[in-house]
């Protein structure tokens, strides 16, 4: 069933002193920021199933802050507005509850998790999010191994601790492998293209396009339009100083490349 991911009038403040922040999978919080600093101002956007929305903007514009509050980072608090997935309010839910509703965040800088293998994480996440108690672990792993091979990840990577000693490209591929395995309804990709060589970039785009064809809605956060050559967005948004200042079609991304963000 098709659904929408809707953000209405969302304003966000950051509390870098939050004791819960360190328990989140990634906490790129500006520790110098004063408590209660407003970082996102009245953002509105609606991503439909099977759509790709590109969110572009200069460094420090609030793109990652928006991504983190959407997924439930405890240091980022919504002070106004709403976030809904399929008509259900997300702001009162914990990150794992948002994930069970079908939301996935691919981190800009995935952290290492010693003691837990990548394969264990994918299998545990799949069972927890889908609630499929009848899934056969052997069949599941065979599928994951094939997906990993197609992405250029060696099978041994599934036995290694999560992101422990992984290269930048391997970390991004591991995130994409999670995506393929979980098949979320909506995904937020925070600079999935950052630091990738052209071959890995094309593979990342292939995964995103595959999910979109199956109905996954995508909010694609990026600095530049390299990945937009392979993933065609339905809408491009420009975020500056925490506000969406312009939205348009893919030609807006080309305009940014020509004029820079100062010209928008």
Image (cartoon, grey):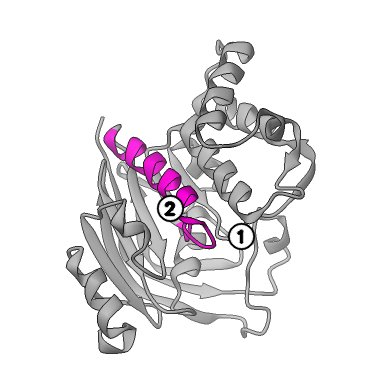
- Residue in the foreground of this view, choosing between 201 and 5: 201
View extreme (bottom): residue:
262
Q: Is residue 229 above or below residue 212?
A: below
Magenta stretch secondary structure, dominant: helix
Q: Is 206 a magenta residue?
A: yes
| Mark 1: secondary structure | loop
User: Horizontally, is 1 left or right of 164 in the view?
Assistant: left
Q: Earlier in the sequence, mark 2 or mark 1?
A: 1
Crowd rating for badge 2 (residues with CA inside 10 Å; few <14, some 14–19, many 20+): many
Tag count in the figure?
2
Highlighted range, magenta? 190-213
Q: Is 173 a magenta residue?
A: no
View extreme (right): residue:
115
Q: Is residue 207 above or below residue 72?
A: above
Residue 222 seen in render: yes
User: Horizontally, is 150 left or right of 109 in the view?
Assistant: left
Q: Residue 242: x percent and y percent?
A: 40, 78
- The residue singled out by tag 1 in the image is 109
Name the image quarter holding residue 241. Answer: bottom left
Q: Residue 211: x percent and y percent?
A: 36, 37
- The residue singled out by tag 2 in the image is 188
């Amino acid at each position: 069933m098709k659904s929408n991911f809707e953000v209405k009038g969302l304003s966000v403040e950051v509390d870098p002193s939050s004791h819960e922040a360190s328990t989140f999978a990634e906490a790129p919080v500006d520790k110098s920021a004063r408590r209660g600093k407003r970082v996102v101002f009245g953002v509105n956007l609606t991503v439909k199933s099977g759509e790709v929305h590109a969110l572009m903007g200069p460094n420090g514009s609030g793109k990652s802050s928006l991504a983190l509050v959407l997924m439930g980072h405890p240091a980022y608090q919504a002070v106004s507005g709403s976030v809904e997935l399929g008509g259900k309010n997300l702001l009162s839910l914990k990150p794992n509850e948002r994930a069970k509703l079908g939301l996935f965040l691919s981190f800009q800088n995935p952290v290492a998790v010693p003691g837990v293998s990548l394969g264990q994480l994918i299998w545990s996440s799949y069972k927890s999010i889908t609630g499929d108690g009848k899934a056969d672990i052997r069949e599941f792993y065979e599928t994951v191994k094939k997906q990993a091979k197609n992405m250029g990840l060696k099978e041994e990577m599934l036995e290694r601790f999560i992101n422990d000693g992984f290269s930048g490209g391997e970390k991004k591929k591991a995130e994409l492998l999670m995506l393929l395995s979980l098949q979320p309804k909506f995904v937020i990709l925070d600079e999935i293209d950052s630091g990738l060589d052209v071959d890995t970039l094309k593979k990342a785009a292939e995964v995103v396009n595959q999910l979109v064809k199956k109905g996954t809605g995508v909010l694609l956060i990026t600095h530049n339009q390299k990945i937009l050559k392979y993933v065609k967005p339905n809408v491009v948004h420009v975020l500056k100083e925490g506000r969406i200042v312009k939205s348009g079609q893919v030609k807006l991304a080309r305009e940014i490349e020509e004029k820079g963000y100062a010209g928008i």
